[in-house]
Amino acid sequence: MSGLEIERKFLVHKDGQPYKKLAYAASRITQGYICADRGRTVRVRMRDNRGFLTIKGPSDPAGTTRYEFEKEITLDEARQLMKLCLPGVIDKTRYLVRSGGHVFEVDEFYGENDGLVMAEVELGSENEPFTKPDFIADEVTGDRRFYNSSLMAMPFSAWRDTLPPEFR
C-alpha cells in the first residue's frame, strides 16, 4: 500500500475500557524504527505472525496527512530488520472498533509506554465527518509526543505527569 495517510489521533479515557468489549478484532504489535528523523520514518513492524516495512514522510502542518508506503515482508525478514533498529521498541495491543462508517484503531501500550491508550481513525479526506465513540477524549493529532517514533525515544513514562489524571 502506498499513498497519502490521513488520520486523526485521540486520547482514550483511562476508564475507557469499553473499547475492549466493542472491539471486533485485536492483535499484538511490536515495532522498531530504522530511521526516526523528523519528517521521515522507516518502521519495522511485527503484527501477530506477519511482518511489515513502512516508510512515512513528513506530516502537513496540522499533522493529519502524510505520505506512507507499506510493504508486507516475511516474519523472518522483520525479525532480522528489527536488529538494525534504533534503541527502544513499541509494544502494544491494537483493538479495532467500528463507529459509524469508520474503524477506530485503539492502541494500548506496554513497557515504558504503559498506561497510554490512544485511538486513531483513518479518513478519505481531511474534512471527512466521522462519529467518535464515547470512550474517545481529547484530540492529539499533530502533537509529536504521541507519534510512535517519539514514544520510542521519549516514552510516556517520562512525561505522563504532564497530562490530566484521567489520561495517566
Image (cartoon, rainbow, N blue to C red):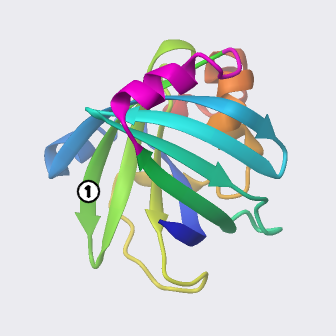
Give the magenta-colored segment's residue range: 73-87
Secondary structure beneath label 1: strand
Left or right of 10 in this view: 87: right
| Number of numbered discs on residues | 1
Q: Residue 79: horizontal and vertical position, in percent?
A: 45, 22
Left or right of 115 in this view: 27: left
Q: Which residue is labeled 1 in the image?
A: 97
Few, some or many C-alpha atoms within 10 Å of disc 1 (few <14, some 14-19, many ≥20)?
A: many
Left or right of 33 in this view: 113: left
At x 26%, y 56%, the residue is: 97
Does residue 30 sit above or below 73 in this rendering? above
Q: Residue 19: horizontal and vertical position, in percent?
A: 26, 46
Q: Quadrant of residue 21?
A: top left
Q: Quadrant of residue 8?
A: bottom right
Could you tell me which quadrant the C terminus lies in? top right
Q: Nearer the viewer, residue 30 or 84?
A: 84
